[in-house]
Amino acid sequence: MRKAGSGNSKLKLSVPGHEASIGKFLTQSGTFKDGNLLVNKDGLRIVSHSEEGGPPLIKPLDNQLSLADLDAIKVVGTGTGGIVQLVRHKWTNQFFALKVIQMNIQEDIRKQIAQELRISLSTQCPFVVLCYQCFYDNGVISIVLEYMDGGSLADFLKDVKTIPEPYLAAICNQASVLNGLIYLHHEKHIIHRDLKPSNILINHSGEVKISDFGVSGIIASSSGQRDTFTGTYNYMSPERITGQKHGYISDIWSLGLVMLECATGQFPYPPHDSFYELLEEVVEQPPPFAPSDQFSVEFTSFISECLQKNPTDRKSAQVLLKHPFLSMYDDLKVDLASYFTSAGSPLATF
């Protein structure tokens, strides 16, 4: 009887050729894929496939989405009571913004969070940042949001200093901030109440979307007015900063200030040492304007239509969408995607 391993007997191993490399079965994130079977460090999953042959992308309010399926990449923002992380879905490789909020905070902040959740989950629009899902666990609320990889207009302004008129027209019209306001005001009956450069987000596809509904107000009364005093003071309309009742048109004042700030590279009002100095400036002094020697007649007119101190003189988002400024650069075929990608900092994907 021949002993195992003696003589000429050898154990032969078959090494796969290069064309059969395991790399052809691996996704970019290191998931082994064969047909509808996916296996990675988090386990095994059988998935249905889209027409393109990969796992179907997560959709807003998808009940299949779970926090366990999200890998944290880095912190991309901080705010009241929490942080915002860039995360990647383990199975689809989609990026999301994960807003993580500790709930051991003041009562007024808790109410703002609840309001943000109500509004975010009810607004599904191409001009508003999408909310995919939210979770509560052990004193922490986690909100899964659409990831806008270009950051905010405030971030972009730090790089470019000013935004030329053709791009501002595209941001309002083509992108479109005004369509977002029309959706909020007339379809959802919501006043944003905190429209400012840091709450207008951009991405590499050239999209511009309104975000952050923590202090937004839902209009339930027939008068279409609110009288609560919340939001960022600097961008408040005269009727809001004095604590009067206000409606959708108060957002238009904020839009005018945002557009003027983007055009000139500085906030339209001079720095103030106190809230009361700002209040006096907004209420007692003439409204800001676009200097006629620096900007087109159409742009100065657009800003003037937004920055009317009397709210009844201000134009609605629907009317402003037809303003000549928004169409005067149509022949240039402005490419916001190229502009955001080339003019700003490298896009924050990783």
Image: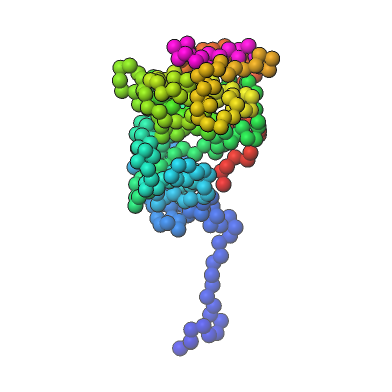
Q: Measuring 48% from the left and 87% from the top, which residue is drawn there?
A: 3
Q: Measuring 62% from the left and 28% from the top, which residue is drawn there?
A: 266
Residue 261 highlighted magenta (yes or no): no
Q: Measuring 54% from the left and 52% from the top, which residue is drawn there?
A: 24
Residue 300 highlighted magenta (yes or no): yes
Residue sitting nearer the eye, 141 or 102: 102
Q: Measuring 65% from the left and 16% from the top, which residue is drawn there?
A: 291
| Position of residue 220 measured from the top left corner of the image (x, y, whole percent) | 31, 23
Which residue sits furthest left? 221
Q: Is residue 280 above or below residue 131?
A: above
| Position of residue 27 measured from the top left corner of the image (x, y, whole percent) | 51, 50
Residue sitting nearer the eye, 58 or 257: 257
**Left or right of 151, for residue 107:** left
Q: Is residue 27 above or below residue 348?
A: below
Residue 82 appearing in the image: yes
Residue sitting nearer the eye, 163 or 341: 163
Q: How is the image coloured?
A: rainbow
Residue 327 appearing in the image: no
Which residue sits furthest bottom? 1
Count of marks overlaid on the render: 0
Residue sitting nearer the eye, 11 or 222: 222
- Which region is colored magenta? 296-314
Q: Is residue 201 above or below residue 281?
A: below
| Position of residue 344 measured from the top left corner of the image (x, y, whole percent) | 63, 35
Q: Main secondary structure of the magenta part?
A: helix
Q: Quadrant of residue 187?
A: top left
| Position of residue 199 measured from the top left corner of the image (x, y, whole percent) | 50, 32
Q: Quadrant of the N terminus?
A: bottom left
**Left or right of 92, for residue 226:** left
Q: Quadrant of residue 191?
A: top left
